Image (cartoon, rainbow, N blue to C red):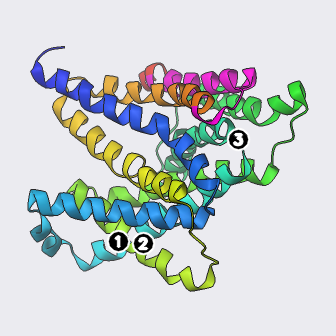
Amino acid sequence: MKNKDDKKAILYVSVTVLSWSTVASAFKLALSSLTYYELLLISSITALIAFAIILTFRKRWFLLRSVSRRQWRMFAIAGTLNPAIYYLVLFKSYELLPAQIAQPINYMWPVVLSLMLAVFARQRIPAVKFVGMTISLAGVAVISIGPGQLTGTNLSALGIALGIGSAFVWATYWLINRMNAETDPIVSLFLNFFFGTIELLMIAPFMKIEISSLQGVLAAVYSGLFEMTIPFICFGIALKKTNNPALINHLCYLSPFLSLFIIHLILGESIYPTTYTGLALIVGGLLFNEYIGTRY
């Protein structure tokens, strides 16, 4: 630690890690009484209100006037991807799979992003990085296939496909949203959720909505705050305050491992050995590419 700000950065990233460590369990608790659409609708509205409160508290509403027409269109596209499509796909995956399976599969999005950057942004991928990608993809295979081989547990093929698909949607959102990189981060998130929430409300008349569980509503509100709002704000603050952004990024890889402990504690899922192994391979492959792949 070089200065006091680095200590604050660790504090903020700790909030991020702890938040993301709990949300897989919150998703499953909500989905025990809500549909995946109901979960997303409540959590998206919660996040939108939270971002509006933050903009009010920080007196940043005037920044909306500087958003160009082109940026409004890009935010509309970004909002369609996240929260609308991304979380619909992800929550459906959680509905079909145990939390310990759905959660780590989604962590393959950096691999997908690297491939998409190579295709669409023509960024060359060093040959050594394919080693890390292969390791991560092997981890996804172990998580997806392993339980059936060891315990005879049949996992939903559709759930696995949706989990992998969510990684593609998130990577696409990342590419689109970086076109709005000059916009204030809170304004950017507010506009994403503004458009995404409007789109979710537009399809509400075509969805069967029967929200009757207080536990489900509270779990959905929690998801909106601790998946979609608080961790992104704290992560951004941590990056601004630190002298070591790489450390801040790498600490976030603790969250999927902590999440497995919380999944076992809260949901009572017995964690498969293949889940630990597969998750270690996924994260190991990502770290390999960050530490080794960037040298070439």
- The residue indicated by pointer 1 is 194
- Which residue is most to the bottom? 205
Q: Residue at x 61, y 21 (%)?
A: 280
The 10 Å Cα crowd at callout 1, few under 14, some 14 to 19, many 20 or more, is many
* Label located before the other in sequence (2 or 3): 3
Q: Between label 2 and label 3, give the one nearer the viewer.
A: 3
Left or right: 200 in relation to 189: right
Q: Secondary structure at mark 1?
A: helix
- Amino acid tagged 2: Thr
Q: How many marks?
A: 3
Q: What kind of residue is marked 3?
A: Pro
Q: CA distance from mark 3 to mark 1?
A: 31 Å
**Residue at the image point whose x is 81% and y is 43% from the top:** 155
Q: Are marks 1 and 2 in contact (CB under 8 Å)?
A: yes
Q: Where does residue 40 sit, x and y in percent of width and height?
A: 51, 63
Relative to 214, is 289 above or below?
above
Q: Residue beneath label 2, please?
A: 197
> In the figure, is residue 28 to the left or right of 120?
right
